[in-house]
Amino acid sequence: MGDEKSLAHTRWNCKYHIVFAPKYQRQAFYGEKRRAVGSILRKLCEWKNVR
């Protein structure tokens, strides 16, 4: 319970920190890296039943 954050009507416990690159750095993620990141995020969402 020590890691939980809360507001008036919400309570959460964030376990993931995802950072997206700004527009000018996007070129570095094109190609294989971009597909790999997409695949990892898709698997994570399926595993956590995120729609």
Image (spheres, rainbow, N blue to C red):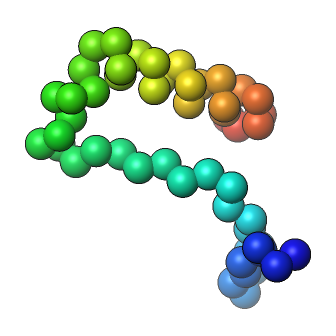
Residue, far bottom: 8
Residue, far right: 1
What residue lies at 41% left-to-right and 16% top-to-bottom?
35
**In the displayed structure, would residue 51 be above or below residue 7?**
above
What residue lies at 82% left-to-right and 79% top-to-bottom?
2
In which quadrant of the rendered view does residue 26 lie?
top left
Q: Tag count in the figure?
A: 0
Quarter placement of the N terminus: bottom right
Q: Is residue 5 left or right of residue 24?
A: right
Residue 12 location (% of width, % of height):
74, 68
**In the displayed structure, would residue 17 be above or below residue 45?**
below
Residue 5 location (% of width, % of height):
71, 78
In which quadrant of the rendered view does residue 3 lie?
bottom right
Q: Is residue 44 left or right of residue 17?
A: right
In front here: 10 or 47? 47
**In the displayed structure, would residue 11 be above or below residue 15?**
below
Residue 13 location (% of width, % of height):
74, 65
What residue lies at 28% left-to-right and 44% top-to-bottom?
21
Quarter placement of the C terminus: top right
What residue lies at 34% left-to-right and 12% top-to-bottom?
32
